[in-house]
Amino acid sequence: MGVDKNGLIRDVRLPFGLSDDEAVAEALRREGLSRSSKAFVLRRSLDARRKEISEVFTIALSDIYSDFSYDFTEEYGKKKKVLITGFGPAGLFAAYLLAGYGFCPTVAERGKPVDERVKDVELFWKTGILDHESNVQFGEGGAGTFSDGKLTTRINDKRCRFVLNTFVGFGANKSILSAAKPHIGTDALRSVIKEMRNKIVSLGGEILYNTKLTDIDIENGRLSSVYLNGERKQYDALILATGNGADDTYKMLMKKSVAIENKPFSVGFRAEFLQSDINIAAYGKNADKYDLPPADFQFFTHLKEGTVYTFCMCPGGYVVNSSSDEERLVTNGMSYSGRNGSNANAAFLATVSASDPSEALFMRRKIERAAYSLHGGKAPATLVKNFTEGTVPTSFGHVLPTFLPGVELTAFDSIFPKNTLSMLRQGMKEFGKRFFYDPQGVLTAPETRTSAPMRIVRDDSFCAVGAYGLYPCGEGAGYAGGIMSSAVDGLRVAEKIIGIKSD
């Protein structure tokens, strides 16, 4: 251990179940340091690799690691009239920061407020009646509202702490500040989003629901006007934070003088297993010995043709219908904050690429339509053993699918391209060797919306190349992947508009 140059005590291994205060006290005692009111748990993670379960802590000796913030002030005034399209994590945090600096931003969200949206989604899951603008893809909170509320990220950015602190300030559990794999949960995230929205409005922001960006005008390389529900409006800046499911927005931009480049994306299915079996695979004989959280897993393997990996693992979760278009089928995973469902699921994906952005959209649509056409809206499903062997199962085993309105057992050969199918089969076999094999695990297809299939190129000012004043932002623009990185990108774009120099 020892205190490093950053004032951190790292790799403090302690018995499972200690409180933050107990962990801090023991770490300081081991280092021969006196108690400090500023010392706190920066990170805690579970280690189940040994005979006895333990937790590994990182202790910060000062509050510099929790203090990154912004000095909200109205001295900037309303120098720019800013429109934000999309009210997912990127749009939410961009609006929050701009409102805090007195910009009074306008948010145009094509979907409905989160409470109304939840009702529409639940109706869709039960009956198949789809609202094209209020679904898992579109509406207040973005697609992450119907996930697990995961806040894990691979980016190393000081703004991550601000995002976590902000979520806690608006009602999220404080455990996300120190958890190695923080999550809010779908149900809790909805409440946090509403509280943030109310704060934005109280600071002068305006939220326009059922309001869709339908077109933009670009003159002499600058954004000149926007069209909301077909009506022409003028703004000084447009933050484009529409998420990666807005195919109509992508198509509109492709017709403009906006630079758009190819970007690898991923397709696959949801793999569903009993949570109790995942717990045993992860914790071994300790699975029932401690009051342990539902276990998760992460997997990737590099094949000759590309990478196969898991994404958005949902312990105690459900596989959900995430379609936003008629006769197209999309799956996703979701967990509530208690993570107490019988099954665990994760996206099981293979990387793919296209020759140009138009082909990428075509590839994605083709997979979604092929999946829908097989059974008229019920999701195609198979079992792990049958998928790897190329056969069709006749019945389910001990793992029952959670997808609504239902699934039909079938082969995936007509859904995915042959090379993609081959990669997924190889990856599933490797997953069984490395971590866990259950021949009766359920695979539900397709998962196609984990990442944007293209990137809207932006310059050093974060404006789109070819359209000054247009700010591509977040996951849909190709600059993020998940709630945390999307929120951070929203902050970075807002900083550019405000004129904050924080890097």
Image: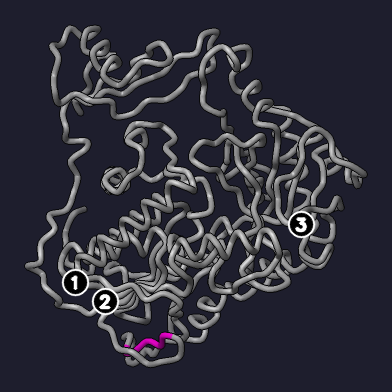
The Cα–Cα distance between marks 2 and 1, rounded to whole angstroms, is 7 Å
Q: Is residue 257 above or below residue 113?
A: below
In the image, is residue 215 part of the stretch drawn in magenta?
no
Label 3 sits on residue: 379
- Circle 1/circle 3 CB separation < 8 Å: no
Q: Earlier in the sequence, mark 2 or mark 1?
A: 2
For badge 2, the amino acid type reads: Val
Magenta residues span 224-228
The secondary element bearing badge 3 is classed as strand
Residue 223 figure quarter: bottom left
Q: Earlier in the sequence, mark 2 or mark 3?
A: 2
Label 1 sits on residue: 103
Q: Residue at x 48, y 55 (%)?
A: 145
Q: Position of residue 90 (x, y in %)?
A: 37, 61
Q: Earlier in the sequence, mark 1 or mark 3?
A: 1
Q: Position of residue 424 (x, y in %)?
A: 73, 46
Near-viewer residue (489 or 230) = 230
Residue found at the very far left of the displayed protein:
75
